[in-house]
Image (spheres, grey):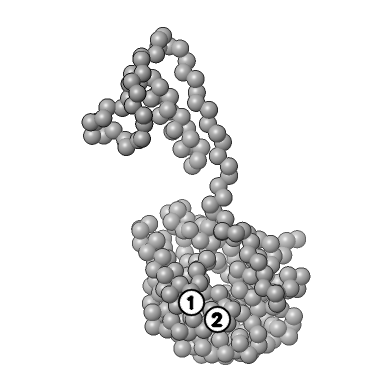
Amino acid sequence: MLRIRSTAAAVLAACLMLLPGCMPANTADAPLIDIECTPTPVPTPRLTPTPTPEITPTPAPAATALPGGIPELPADLDPTKPMVALTFDDGPSRKTERILDCLEANGGRATFFVVGTQLEKFPEITKRASDLGCEIGNHTYDHANLTKISGDEIRHQINSVNELVLNATGKKVTLVRNPYGAGIKDEHVKKYMEYPMIMWSIDTLDWDHRDTDKTLKAIRKDVQDGSIILMHDLYDATAAAVEVIVPELIAEGYQLVTVTELFAAKGYPLEAAHYYRNAHPKD
Ligand code: NI
């Protein structure tokens, strides 16, 4: 895109050099460009090649990297030891409190991808999660499928939740999880996505079966260093599974960290409009 812009600028600049004078001031269609209008003589002879203006190469875009690059790790996190990120979508709800009780009692953290309509009902629960060191991510205002809405609507879905989270917790959101996992490879969605899109490596399907044992089984089967585990803080069956798996994972030597901590500890930068399914160690 930068190259296209530079080329367009070069063409425009070259054209202007050939014009006798400047752009007409009263042409309705004239682009609004701030150009000094000193009349210049018609270049002679006209076929003399116009020197191509020198274009300074623009450095690789740094705007996609999060400010500050890889964040600092909390003191209690050992990057040399295994870790997983428990993630909960679609809350907050009253069930979130039971999950927070368990995390607090065991000394673990998680990431909550909240929806705006729920956050409006339970801002104090999200505030408590944040105060406990949990991370709050963005799951859109009303669980929108981002592939089916306009760019302005995508922005509104994300920005309104960012504002609600900031008001509730005093902290800025830096992660998005697209509802239904939709649009992570969609150019329209990516164009308007100013945050990393966090997917998962273990889908417990807790929302579907609402069965504690099935949730536990899904986690135990596939958990490994760098896993991102998907659950929903809307169901008693999920909260019951959390009460079993949190002490179990800790006893197995896993650190329960937030998504941002997970990627920082593994040394993987998170970039806007990119998607991530896990932070498994490099081979
Ligand atoms: Ni969801």
Provide the secondary structure element on which disc 1 rests. helix
Q: Position of residue 152 (x, y in %)?
A: 35, 58
Residue 54, compared with residue 115, is above or below; it is above
Q: Position of residue 227 (x, y in %)?
A: 65, 72
What's under tag 2, amino acid-wise? Asp
**Rendered residue at 69%/86% (across/down):** 248
Give the position of the C terminus as an image quadrant.
bottom right
**Rendered residue at 61%/79% (across/down):** 109
Name the residue tied to disc 2. Answer: 131
User: Does the image show residue 100?
Assistant: yes
> Between 122 and 75, which is closer to the camera in this rendering?
75
**Rendered residue at 58%/82% (across/down):** 132
Q: CA distance from mark 2 to mark 1?
A: 8 Å
Residue 169, numbered circle: 1
Q: Would you say 142 lies left or right of 261 here?
A: left
> Between 212 and 16, which is closer to the camera in this rendering?
16
What's under tag 1, amino acid-wise? Thr
User: Does the image show residue 280?
Assistant: no
**Residue density around tag 1, few if under 14, some if 14–19, many if 20 or more, within 10 Å:** many
